[in-house]
Amino acid sequence: MRIADHISKLGTETAFAVAAKAAAHAAAGGRVYPFHLGDLNMPTVQTVQEAAVRAMRDGKTGYCPPAGIPPLRDALAQDANGKRGTAYSMENVSVQPGGKPVIAKFLMALMNPGDEVLCPNPGFPIYESQIEFLGGKVLPYPIIPAGDRFTFDLDALEQCVTPKTRLIIINDYHNPTGAELSAAGRERMAALIDRYNLTVLLDEAYFETHYDNKADSLVSLPGMAERSVLLYTFSKKFAMTGWRLGAALGPKAIIDIFNKINVNYESCTCQFVQWGGLEGLTGDQSGPKKIVDTLRERRDVAVDILNDTPGVACIKPNASFYLYPDVTELMARKGFGDNYDAFAEDVLAQTGVSFCTRLHFGRPLPGETRRYIRLAFSGIDLADIREGLGKLRRYATR
Ligand code: PLP
């Protein structure tokens, strides 16, 4: 059997390889503290579960419109309009089996071979994978620490732009750093998008996993909704990662293309899952609030322990369920230099703490000198966060 050449360009989420190592450690009798996977160890919001079961029992088990069931499309448009000040109607919404498919479909709809796509680095690895698989060129722009938060390096971003740059991927409320644009940063980003005539994939997967202030969106600014496709997901807000429910919101002409791609790929998103999601969006909101409250408590405990760990410095993110501590000093003192894999293996062997590293989030940029790891606190309870990170602290003091 001969495998097609283009498959060599397809990347992956190497976090799954970390999961395999953690599983091997557990199989050998070791205790694992799972900070590696961005999944939630909480049940799906109860009202969503009940609505989906009801829909299944009511026979909502056949094909449905490729764009999604009309009440869900309408509810998604209204939800975005309420939170982002847009003027979407259901024609601007294409329901998807998760947020992730929006990435490839956006590129299929808008990227020609050879087009350049600005892409955050570090960043969600599927952006690079799909840009390269579909024949585009990745232009990585840096996400950097700035005092007590991570932010988008807009100067560096502007320097990347060439006449071939057509698209930009923005992950506001960012995986892995939790970076978000400031109000001024968002204005400047909008001006850059206008100046260079870019089309935007705005990945706001963590828009509602936000701890302090109300989240703001680039599509609220004049002219931006017309240039953007918004990635929406039910995964994080309602603890529905495995259900596979998300959506693309954008100009009708692009959404019509998404719907045509849906027909070709999956026909439609599972119907009773959509009825469950509709109840989540429109019904009682105490379930999603409880999820954010639980995550906030975990974040606060984890950040405090990490900042009390010699050689580790951790910015407290306002959004997402990831921490991206700087471990440069710890790695150096333990003699690992820039050898992330050896460091991660040693920490797993000595403490059971399992995590991803900077290498899982795009190719390191020239001139990078600081070393980072990513800890997800979505899949581990408070007691285990205390115990696991306590072991990491003792490891660091030895
Ligand atoms: N975008 C970002 C930044 C993510 O971190 C994820 C998942 O981890 C997704 C999109 C896709 O999530 P889903 O396909 O579960 O909606």
Image (tube, rainbow, N blue to C red):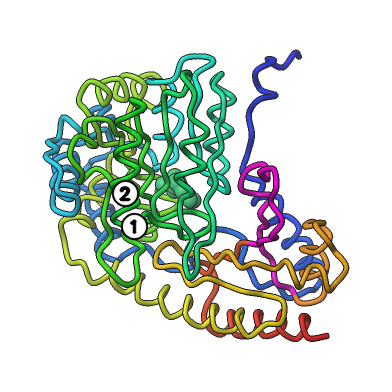
Q: Residue at x 35, y 41 (%)?
A: 202
Instruction: Using the image as rendered, state which of residue 267 and residue 378 is in the foreground.
Output: 378
Marks 2 & 1, CB-CB < 8 Å contact? yes
Residue 375, picture quadrant:
bottom right
- Residue 202 lies left or right of residue 304; in this view the side is left
Q: Secondary structure at mark 2?
A: helix
The span shown in magenta is 352-373
Which residue is label 1 attached to? 182
The percent coordinates of residue 102 (x first, y second) are: 39, 34
Q: Is residue 243 above or below residue 396?
A: above
- Residue 93 lies left or right of residue 115; in this view the side is left
The percent coordinates of residue 377 (x first, y second) are: 53, 69
Instruction: Using the image as rendered, state which of residue 281 and residue 251 is in the foreground.
Output: 251
Name the main secondary structure of what is drawn in magenta.
loop
Quarter of the figure that contains the C terminus: bottom right
Instruction: Using the image as rendered, state which of residue 376 and residue 1 is in the foreground.
Output: 376
Is 88 magenta? The answer is: no
- Which amino acid type is marked by label 2? Arg
Residue 186's label in the rendered image is 2
Is label 2 within 8 A of ligand 1 (CB to nearest ligand atom)? Answer: no
